[in-house]
Amino acid sequence: MPLTADRAKPAVPFGGQYRLIDFAISNLINSGLRQLVVLTQYKSHSLDRHISQTWRMSALLDAYVTSVPAQQRLGKRWFSGSADAILQSLNLINDEQPDIVIVVGADHVYRMDFRQMLDAHLASGARATVAGIRQPTALAHQFGVIDVDPEHPGRIRDFLEKPQNATGLTDAPHEILASMGNYIFDANALIEAVTVDGEIATSNHDMGGDIIPYFVARGEAGVYDMKLNEVPGSTDRDRSYWRDVGTIDSFFDAHRDLISTLPIFNLYNTDWPIHSQTVNSPPAKFVRDSVGRIGNAIDSIVSLGSVLSGTHLERSVVGPWTLAGGGSTITDAVLFDHVRVGQGARVHRAILDKNVVLADGATVGVDRERDLDRGFTVTDSGITIVGKGTHVAA
């Protein structure tokens, strides 16, 4: 919040022209996996529209990406968790009769070749495989942590939810394996697991919290170390990059990972592209303002259709169709599409949602107390978020 006040989290814009869900779908498509369903529930209109307009596959090849809303097939109730979402959508699996089902989250930023994980799953004999990403031991309390069985490498001994005192890996004591929220299942095993879970009244019906421990208890859960994944075009700097952007701070930091000269996450890897909707617009333009002031853009991304007139832009990501007036300053900021920044306005350490308008001389992120008084969200780290369609007076 407030970026999800009017949209599902996977539909939140990212990196200028993308939506968060584009990363998950691009990874699956690039991996040659082309029968995809997106299970949606809350505030899904912009997500459904994005999928409909962007992800059109060839029916000739029996390929598709389609949204499937909650259908209340098991009674008059919504999804009560990610596992329940699959339980209530088993008709999709029964219709296709697949041998394997891959389940991924739709709101993470990363590159991954799922075909390599699939090969490892088939070779292991496990009925469920969890993708794990190496993270510092000090951050273990933020993740679901995979405890690998030392006697059976590749098998999960325990699955720890946000442990306070996690033990490091044998080959890297300063690291743990955190669950990426990506899973591969034998189809019949997944059907069995979510069906059993659906009968447990005390379950949270969560994939990570309930379904994976079910397989762990039976000795049937394997782990795939993301360190083994070789994505074409990746470099040592951005290899194995993964960010859970579930908080404003992590969302903001992930944008900063895009803009350095040698980015930590490289959007320009043409060997493994991140696809999104093609924006029908002219190129971005940088011009002098009406009194001849010259603007500049430093360490920033500017999307199509944007016009910056005499603007100082630094360490920022600007979405499509943004207009910034003469003498304005935008630093350490993330702007969504159709933002208007008036003459002499200042934006610093802020996220401006779609259709935000700053009047001439207005400020955001400059005075914390004033931002709070105006009802803006301000994180403990000092990032100000202005909600969709807000008009900010001087």
Image (cartoon, rainbow, N blue to C red):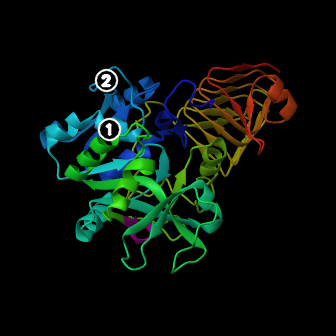
The correct choice, above or below, for 96 with respect to 220 in the image is above
Q: Position of residue 305 (x, y in %)?
A: 54, 32
- Tell whether 249 sits left or right of 43: right
In the image, 172 versus 344, the foreground residue is: 172
Residue 392 placement: quadrant: top right
Three-letter residue code for mark 1? Glu
Residue beneath disc 2: 72
Residue 272 placement: quadrant: bottom left
Quadrant position of the N terminus in the picture? top right
Q: Position of residue 314 (x, y in %)?
A: 72, 46
Quadrant position of the C terminus in the picture? top right
Three-letter residue code for mark 2? Gln
Q: Of tags 1 and 2, which is closer to the observer?
A: 1
Q: Position of residue 368 (x, y in %)?
A: 84, 34
Task: Using the image, tell me which numbered label, if any, was put on residue 199.
Answer: 1
In the image, 77 versus 91, the foreground residue is: 77
- Tell whether 115 sits left or right of 44: left
Q: Which residues are magenta?
A: 223-228
Q: Is residue 224 magenta?
A: yes
Is residue 230 something one can see in this rendering? no
Residue plotted at (65% across, 24% down): 356
Residue plotted at (76% across, 20% down): 359
Q: Position of residue 259 (x, y in %)?
A: 62, 53
In the image, 298 versus 71, the foreground residue is: 71
Give the CA separation, mark 1 to mark 2.
Answer: 16 Å
Classify mark 2: helix, strand or loop: loop
The correct choice, above or below, for 260 with respect to 136 in the image is above
Residue plotted at (36% across, 54% down): 214
- Tell whether 15 sits left or right of 182: right
